[in-house]
Image (cartoon, rainbow, N blue to C red):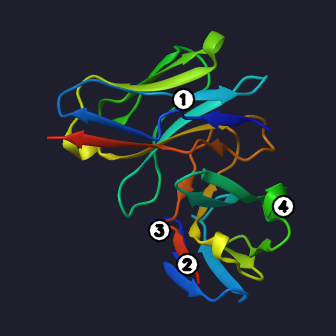
Amino acid sequence: DAGVTQTPRHEVAEKGQTIILKCEPVSGHNDLFWYRQTKIQGLELLSYFRSKSLMEDGGAFKDRFKAEMLNSSFSTLKIQPTEPKDSAVYLCASSFGGPNTEVFFGKGTRLTVV
Amino acid sequence: AQSVTQPDARVTVSEGASLQLRCKYSYSGTPYLFWYVQYPRQGLQLLLKYYSGDPVVQGVNGFEAEFIKSNSSFHLRKASVHWSDSAVYFCAVSASNNNAPRFGAGTKLSVKP
């Protein structure tokens, strides 16, 4: 079975650019998550969807970060405009749903903003 | 929302030694607790999880964790570590059915040969 697929694996953007990260969750999963991973903060929640409906978004990330689920098998994370402090690894994850279920993670997209 | 604290950013132990990685959570209700591991260039993978029952839960590769409600803790343990256990370990907590899991900052484990 295919796991969570994220593209691209690496992205370099100039300050002020718009970038779009892509994610394909595990087939059949109802919940989809976007997290940002940094060494200092660890995993910070950006967005959480259940059956394509937005359930939570990370308050600190509302301004320039927008995640969407166009269908149950595809999600995007748009950062507009990018800033150097956005340099991090962006993780997409999915699960069947429910607080006791395992979350499956993609390998992440490493974003560098120069 | 719920939150997790992992107080140790880095832990170094010798191969064959015992290990404890600390995790404390903050949530007033009944938590669902998890440990995940991230090997280099890999996605996070589930090690073990706890919701109810025996407070000591067993996971993969000889790992176990103990839920201590009075201390709001869910520390990870292993009796004898191997060099291949070197990785970053994340503690996570889920709360209600409408909240995403929250993760700690992670603990980087280095095992010396």
- In this view, the mark in front (4 or 1): 1
- In this view, the mark in front (1 or 2): 2
Q: Chain of mark 2?
A: A
Residue type of the residue flagged with mark 2:
Thr
Residue wearing tag 4: A54
Q: How many residues crowd mark 4 within 10 Å: few (<14), some (14–19), many (20+)? A: some
x then y, percent, for residue B16:
17, 29
Q: Chain of mark 3?
A: A
Residue type of the residue flagged with mark 4:
Leu
x then y, percent, for residue A44:
67, 54
Q: Is residue A16 left or right of residue B63?
A: right
Secondary element at image label 2? strand
Residue wearing tag 1: B23
Residues behind callouts 4 and 1 on a single chain: no
Location of residue B80 (image quadrant): top left
The Cα atoms of the two marked residues, 3 and 4, are separated by 24 Å
Residues behind callouts 4 and 2 on a single chain: yes
**On the rendered image, what quadrant is the N terminus of chain B found in?**
top right
Q: Chain of mark 1?
A: B
